[in-house]
Image (cartoon, rainbow, N blue to C red):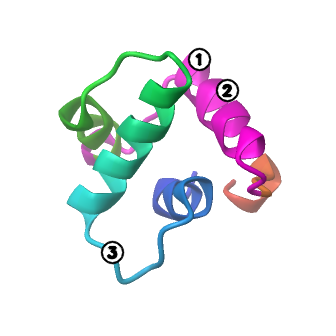
Amino acid sequence: MNLDKLLIDATGLNEASSARQRHHALQQMLAEDGHSISAKGVGKWFERESLPATWLVNILKSAQRRGRRVDLKNYI
């Protein structure tokens, strides 16, 4: 799964943004929707190149609430 592309599309940041900025933006987006995770926790997903399915669903829902078109098939 292309987690970097998913993160860019879900947060609305551009490709020039740093990994730290992306992780923080995703953490903020999830927090605004009532989910509790730290930016470090998000960073660990990308270090391991593994994203828990529950969080994947939360990310997709959060992105869609913000009008971002995120289709899972684009990241597999």
Magenta run includes residue 34 = no
Report helix, strand or loop for mark 1: helix
Distance (Cα) linking label 3 and label 1: 26 Å
Asked if the residues shown at circle 2 and circle 1 are in contact, with their CB atoms under 8 angstroms apart, the answer is yes
Query: Mark 1 belongs to which amino acid?
Result: Thr
Q: Nearer the viewer, mark 3 or mark 1?
A: 3
**Helix, strand, or loop for circle 3?**
loop
Q: What residue is rendered at 29% in x and 47% in y?
A: 24
Q: Secondary structure at mark 2?
A: helix
In the picture, the quarter occupied by the C terminus is bottom right
| Left or right: 56 as drawn, with respect to 26 | right
Q: Residues within 10 Å of mark 3 (few under 14, many from 20)?
A: few
Mark 2 is surrounded, within 10 Å at the Cα level, by few (under 14), some (14 to 19) or many (20 or more) other residues, namely: few
Nearer the observer, 17 or 44: 17
Mark 1 is surrounded, within 10 Å at the Cα level, by few (under 14), some (14 to 19) or many (20 or more) other residues, namely few
Amino acid type of disc 2? Val
Q: Where's residue 50, x and y in %?
A: 42, 36
Three-letter residue code for mark 3: Ser
The residue at which mark 3 appears reads as: 17
Residue 71 pos. (x, y %): 81, 52
Q: Which residue is mark 1?
A: 54
> What is the span of residues highlighted in magenta in the rendered image?
47-68
Q: CA distance from mark 2 to mark 1?
A: 5 Å
Badge number at residue 75: none
Question: Disc 2 designates what residue?
Answer: 57
